Image (cartoon, rainbow, N blue to C red):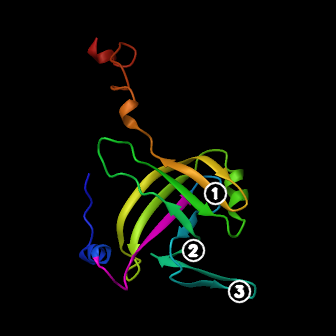
Amino acid sequence: MSRTLSSSMLRAIYAEETGDYPILLITITHPSLAAPLRISSDPTQRTVVTDEEVVYGTVSRAETFVFVPFSISLPNDSAEETPQTSITIDNVGREMVPTIRALTSAPEITLEMVMASTPDVVEAVFPGFALSSVTYDAMSISGTLSVTEFTTEPCPAGTFNPAEFPGMF
Protein backbone atom coordinates (compact mmCIF):
# COMPACT_ATOMS: atom_id res chain seq x y z
CA MET A 1 0.00 0.00 0.00
CA SER A 2 1.51 3.31 -1.00
CA ARG A 3 1.07 6.64 0.75
CA THR A 4 0.69 10.05 -0.83
CA LEU A 5 2.78 12.68 0.94
CA SER A 6 2.52 16.42 0.43
CA SER A 7 5.06 18.17 -1.74
CA SER A 8 6.36 20.11 1.28
CA MET A 9 7.08 16.88 3.16
CA LEU A 10 8.78 15.33 0.15
CA ARG A 11 10.92 18.47 -0.31
CA ALA A 12 11.93 18.38 3.36
CA ILE A 13 12.75 14.66 3.21
CA TYR A 14 14.88 14.94 0.09
CA ALA A 15 16.47 18.33 0.80
CA GLU A 16 20.11 18.54 1.74
CA GLU A 17 19.30 21.36 4.18
CA THR A 18 15.90 22.62 5.26
CA GLY A 19 14.24 24.53 8.06
CA ASP A 20 11.16 22.34 7.85
CA TYR A 21 11.20 18.74 9.06
CA PRO A 22 8.85 15.85 9.90
CA ILE A 23 7.66 15.34 13.48
CA LEU A 24 6.39 11.99 14.77
CA LEU A 25 3.43 12.12 17.16
CA ILE A 26 2.43 9.15 19.34
CA THR A 27 -0.97 8.75 20.97
CA ILE A 28 -1.35 6.02 23.62
CA THR A 29 -4.94 5.12 24.55
CA HIS A 30 -6.40 2.56 26.94
CA PRO A 31 -9.79 2.27 28.68
CA SER A 32 -8.17 2.61 32.12
CA LEU A 33 -6.34 5.85 31.23
CA ALA A 34 -8.17 9.04 32.19
CA ALA A 35 -6.81 10.78 29.09
CA PRO A 36 -4.62 9.58 26.22
CA LEU A 37 -0.86 9.96 26.59
CA ARG A 38 0.48 12.13 23.78
CA ILE A 39 4.20 12.19 22.92
CA SER A 40 6.09 14.28 20.35
CA SER A 41 9.50 13.70 18.81
CA ASP A 42 10.22 17.42 18.75
CA PRO A 43 10.37 20.24 21.34
CA THR A 44 8.59 22.59 18.93
CA GLN A 45 7.42 25.12 21.52
CA ARG A 46 6.85 25.69 25.22
CA THR A 47 3.54 24.05 25.99
CA VAL A 48 3.27 24.09 29.79
CA VAL A 49 5.04 26.54 32.06
CA THR A 50 4.60 26.32 35.83
CA ASP A 51 6.69 27.60 38.70
CA GLU A 52 8.54 24.28 38.95
CA GLU A 53 8.54 23.03 35.39
CA VAL A 54 8.85 24.11 31.77
CA VAL A 55 7.56 21.49 29.31
CA TYR A 56 8.17 21.53 25.58
CA GLY A 57 6.16 19.77 22.92
CA THR A 58 4.03 20.10 19.82
CA VAL A 59 0.46 21.36 19.58
CA SER A 60 -1.39 19.60 16.78
CA ARG A 61 -5.14 19.93 16.17
CA ALA A 62 -5.57 21.62 19.59
CA GLU A 63 -3.97 18.65 21.41
CA THR A 64 -0.66 18.97 23.26
CA PHE A 65 1.95 16.30 22.56
CA VAL A 66 4.71 16.45 25.20
CA PHE A 67 8.31 16.14 23.98
CA VAL A 68 9.91 12.95 25.24
CA PRO A 69 13.00 11.55 23.50
CA PHE A 70 12.29 8.19 21.86
CA SER A 71 13.55 5.98 19.09
CA ILE A 72 11.37 4.00 16.74
CA SER A 73 11.72 2.00 13.59
CA LEU A 74 8.80 2.80 11.31
CA PRO A 75 6.78 -0.18 10.07
CA ASN A 76 7.00 -1.55 6.57
CA ASP A 77 4.27 -0.32 4.26
CA SER A 78 3.84 -3.65 2.55
CA ALA A 79 0.70 -5.66 1.82
CA GLU A 80 2.59 -8.95 2.24
CA GLU A 81 3.79 -8.40 5.83
CA THR A 82 2.10 -7.59 9.10
CA PRO A 83 3.35 -4.19 10.30
CA GLN A 84 5.53 -4.53 13.37
CA THR A 85 8.01 -2.12 14.90
CA SER A 86 9.91 -1.54 18.11
CA ILE A 87 9.91 1.57 20.26
CA THR A 88 12.09 2.82 23.09
CA ILE A 89 10.90 5.83 25.10
CA ASP A 90 13.25 7.61 27.49
CA ASN A 91 11.95 7.54 31.04
CA VAL A 92 13.05 11.10 31.77
CA GLY A 93 10.16 12.13 34.01
CA ARG A 94 9.68 8.76 35.73
CA GLU A 95 5.87 9.14 35.38
CA MET A 96 5.42 6.69 32.52
CA VAL A 97 6.56 3.46 34.22
CA PRO A 98 3.83 3.51 36.90
CA THR A 99 1.26 4.33 34.22
CA ILE A 100 2.37 1.48 31.91
CA ARG A 101 2.70 -0.92 34.86
CA ALA A 102 -0.91 -0.22 35.94
CA LEU A 103 -2.37 -1.25 32.56
CA THR A 104 -3.90 -4.73 32.55
CA SER A 105 -3.96 -5.14 28.77
CA ALA A 106 -2.08 -3.79 25.78
CA PRO A 107 -2.67 -0.09 25.09
CA GLU A 108 -3.47 1.08 21.56
CA ILE A 109 -0.86 3.22 19.83
CA THR A 110 -1.39 5.61 16.91
CA LEU A 111 1.62 7.05 15.07
CA GLU A 112 1.21 10.24 13.04
CA MET A 113 3.65 12.27 10.97
CA VAL A 114 3.28 16.04 10.64
CA MET A 115 5.55 18.80 9.39
CA ALA A 116 7.02 21.35 11.81
CA SER A 117 5.61 24.20 9.72
CA THR A 118 2.09 22.67 9.57
CA PRO A 119 1.53 20.56 12.72
CA ASP A 120 -2.25 20.50 12.19
CA VAL A 121 -1.92 18.69 8.84
CA VAL A 122 -1.34 14.95 9.30
CA GLU A 123 0.85 13.63 6.49
CA ALA A 124 0.76 9.91 7.38
CA VAL A 125 -1.12 7.88 9.98
CA PHE A 126 -0.25 4.42 11.30
CA PRO A 127 -3.24 3.49 13.51
CA GLY A 128 -4.19 0.41 15.51
CA PHE A 129 -0.88 -0.74 16.96
CA ALA A 130 -0.87 -2.68 20.23
CA LEU A 131 2.05 -2.20 22.63
CA SER A 132 3.31 -5.57 23.82
CA SER A 133 6.45 -7.17 25.23
CA VAL A 134 7.05 -4.11 27.40
CA THR A 135 10.27 -3.91 29.39
CA TYR A 136 11.43 -0.97 31.47
CA ASP A 137 14.21 0.19 33.70
CA ALA A 138 15.24 3.46 35.29
CA MET A 139 16.29 4.93 31.94
CA SER A 140 13.82 3.72 29.30
CA ILE A 141 10.66 1.86 28.36
CA SER A 142 10.84 -0.53 25.40
CA GLY A 143 8.18 -2.52 23.61
CA THR A 144 6.93 -4.00 20.39
CA LEU A 145 4.21 -2.38 18.34
CA SER A 146 2.14 -4.78 16.25
CA VAL A 147 -1.29 -5.00 14.67
CA THR A 148 -3.76 -7.87 14.68
CA GLU A 149 -3.07 -10.14 11.75
CA PHE A 150 -6.42 -10.85 10.15
CA THR A 151 -4.97 -13.23 7.57
CA THR A 152 -4.81 -15.99 10.19
CA GLU A 153 -8.48 -15.65 11.12
CA PRO A 154 -10.82 -18.39 9.86
CA CYS A 155 -12.90 -17.47 6.85
CA PRO A 156 -15.80 -17.56 6.72
CA ALA A 157 -16.24 -16.90 10.42
CA GLY A 158 -19.67 -18.53 10.59
CA THR A 159 -21.13 -21.67 9.09
CA PHE A 160 -24.39 -22.16 7.26
CA ASN A 161 -26.31 -24.56 9.47
CA PRO A 162 -30.01 -25.04 10.33
CA ALA A 163 -29.66 -23.36 13.74
CA GLU A 164 -28.19 -20.11 12.41
CA PHE A 165 -29.78 -20.01 8.93
CA PRO A 166 -33.13 -21.88 9.14
CA GLY A 167 -34.43 -20.29 5.91
CA MET A 168 -31.84 -22.12 3.87
CA PHE A 169 -32.97 -25.57 5.00
Residue at 67 percent across and 54 percent down: it is 100
Question: Do residues under tags 2 and 3 come within 8 Å of each other at their CB atoms?
Answer: no
The amino acid type of the residue labelled 2 equals: Phe
Question: Do residues under tags 1 and 2 come within 8 Å of each other at their CB atoms?
Answer: no
Q: Is residue 65 left or right of residue 95?
A: left
The amino acid type of the residue labelled 3 equals: Thr
User: Looking at the picture, how far across and down is residue 62, in whole percent?
Assistant: 49, 77
The amino acid type of the residue labelled 1 equals: Ile
Q: Which of pointers 2 and 3 indicates the residue nearer the eye?
A: 2
Secondary element at image label 3: loop
Q: Closest to the observer: 105 or 15?
A: 15
Q: Is 80 placed above or below 31 here?
A: above
Q: Closest to the observer: 160 or 52?
A: 52
Residue on which the image places disc 3: 50
Badge count: 3
Residue 27 colored in magenta in the image:
yes
